[in-house]
Amino acid sequence: MRISQEQNRMEILELVQLETKRLCCKYNKDFLDCEDLMKITNLGRDNVSTMMKRKDFPLLKVGKRNIVNIASFVEWQIRQTYKEV
């Protein structure tokens, strides 16, 4: 059982790395803003704003801008997905 849990963690880590690399290349940046998240998630502005206000969301405030590191977002998104399964 321990081997499968460790293997599962490795697969998730690899998934995070691959998705982070894909998004960094696609958007040519390391941080995403509300507009980028709207494109990625297919959610509207209000839903993305609500998502970004969650306490567990890895939000960074730079002045008045709200941004998220791509790697942190991907990891958060995967954790949310596995939480619901």
Image (cartoon, rainbow, N blue to C red):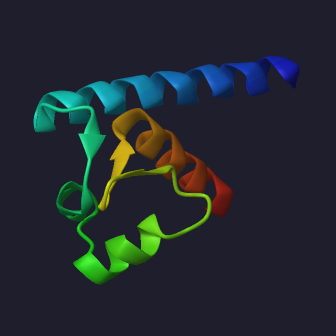
Tell whether 81 sits left or right of 9: left
Count of numbered circles on the image? 0
Residue furthest out toward the right: 1
> Is the N terminus in the top left, top right, bottom left or bottom right quadrant?
top right
Q: In the image, is residue 32 above or below residue 24?
A: below
- Closest to the observer, 23 or 60: 60
Q: In the image, is residue 64 above or below residue 21?
A: below
Q: Residue at x 44, y 69 (%)?
A: 51
Q: In the image, is residue 45 above or below residue 24?
A: below
Q: In the image, is residue 8 above or below residue 39?
A: above
Q: Residue at x 43, y 45 (%)?
A: 73
Tell whether 16 sits left or right of 62: right
Q: Residue at x 17, y 62 (%)?
A: 35
Residue furthest out toward the front: 63
* x then y, percent, for residue 50: 43, 77
Tell whether 55 sits left or right of 29: right
* x then y, percent, for residue 31: 28, 40
* x then y, percent, for residue 6: 74, 20
